[in-house]
Image (spheres, rainbow, N blue to C red):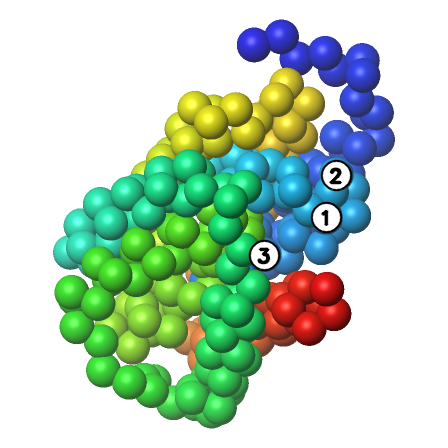
């Protein structure tokens, strides 16, 4: 693929690199949400219609690094329940990318994420509801569809992993493995349906290289954190992600 870098301001690429590094550092120490934190910035820089493919491409590029870092912590029994359904959902969503509006779903997911601060009493409570392994099959399908449309839905998986007894390094490692194959299906879908042009590839690569650096910095910080501190960061990011989804969903639902 011929990437014409001279048509793209180098400052934009540098800013995308910094965005990837900062958000994925925070993502690593809080169990996810890096992609969702990128959404407002990328909406402003490249437009809402192009944000999801760039975010998912950048995250996909960074995921092998996170998998290698946390390989021994991956909970494979959860992985095998989640991934097949997630890949099917991602391919379906790429096909429907320009045809379906999901604002009501975004609003409901946002409210659920905000409620986690009360569910877990800001990290003091270990679990808020019981989770069985088969729950990860419909969860993978649902998260992949919404994430393919919006560019980030990682935080919605966190309450289910925490309630399944998966915490800290195990949560980050398991999500990394799941997300790699979800991202693979997303990128294949975007390419097949013509949703990634050379400029968006370049943006995604810059974002992904920054995210690789963020994974390495985040790993160093995560291993120095207590479980309580990790849960508090995780809940904070879930609440912020929920608020972003609500803010994004309200205007088209009620003012268009």
**Gap between marks 3 and 2, in whole Å?**
15 Å
Tell me whether circle 1 and circle 2 mark residues in contact (CB < 8 Å).
yes
Describe the element under mark 3 as helix, strand or loop: helix
Q: Quadrant of residue 241?
A: bottom right
Locate the C terminus by quadrant. bottom right
Q: Which mark is residue 234?
A: none
Other-residue count near label 2 (Cα within 10 Å), few / some / many at <14 / 14–19 / ≥20: few
Q: What crowding class fits label 3: few (fewer than 14 Cα within 10 Å), some (14-19), or many (20 or more)?
A: many
Position of the N terminus by quadrant: top right
- Against 225, residue 125 (above or below) is below
Which circle's residue, 1 or 3, is located before the other in the chain?
A: 3
N-terminal of the pair, mark 3 or mark 2, is 3
Return the residue at label 3.
36
- In the picture, the disc for residue 46 is 2
> Which-is-in-front pick, marks 1 and 3?
1
* Rendered position, 66 above or below 109: above
**C-alpha distance separating marks 1 and 2:** 6 Å
Q: Position of residue 197 (x, y in %)?
A: 61, 22
Give the labeled residue for mark 1: 43
Work out whether residue 13 can be spotted.
yes
| Separation of residues labelled 1 and 3 (CA atoms) | 11 Å
Return the residue found at the far top: 2
């Amino acid at each position: 693929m011929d990437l014409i870098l001279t048509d793209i301001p180098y400052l934009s690429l540098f800013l995308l690199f910094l965005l990837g590094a900062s958000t994925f550092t925070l993502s690593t120490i809080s169990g996810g949400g890096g992609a969702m934190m990128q959404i407002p910035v990328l909406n402003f820089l490249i437009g809402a219609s192009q944000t999801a493919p760039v975010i998912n491409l950048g995250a996909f590029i960074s995921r092998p690094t996170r998998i290698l870092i946390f390989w021994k912590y991956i909970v494979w029994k959860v992985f095998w329940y989640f991934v097949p359904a997630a890949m099917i959902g991602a391919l379906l969503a790429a096909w429907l990318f320009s045809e379906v509006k999901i604002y009501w779903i975004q609003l409901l997911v946002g409210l659920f994420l905000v409620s986690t601060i009360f569910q877990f009493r800001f990290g003091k409570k270990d679990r808020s509801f019981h989770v069985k392994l088969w729950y990860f099959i419909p969860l993978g399908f649902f998260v992949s569809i919404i994430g393919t449309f919006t560019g980030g839905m990682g935080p919605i998986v966190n309450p289910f992993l925490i309630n399944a007894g998966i915490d800290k390094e195990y949560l980050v490692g398991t999500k990394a493995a799941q997300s790699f194959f979800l991202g693979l299906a997303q990128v294949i879908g975007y390419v097949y349906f013509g949703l990634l042009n050379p400029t968006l590839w370049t943006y995604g690569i810059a974002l992904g290289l920054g995210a690789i650096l963020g994974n390495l910095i985040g790993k160093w910080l995560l291993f120095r954190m207590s479980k309580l501190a990790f849960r508090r960061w995780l809940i904070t990011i879930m609440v912020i992600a929920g608020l972003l989804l609500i803010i994004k969903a309200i205007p088209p639902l009620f003012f268009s």
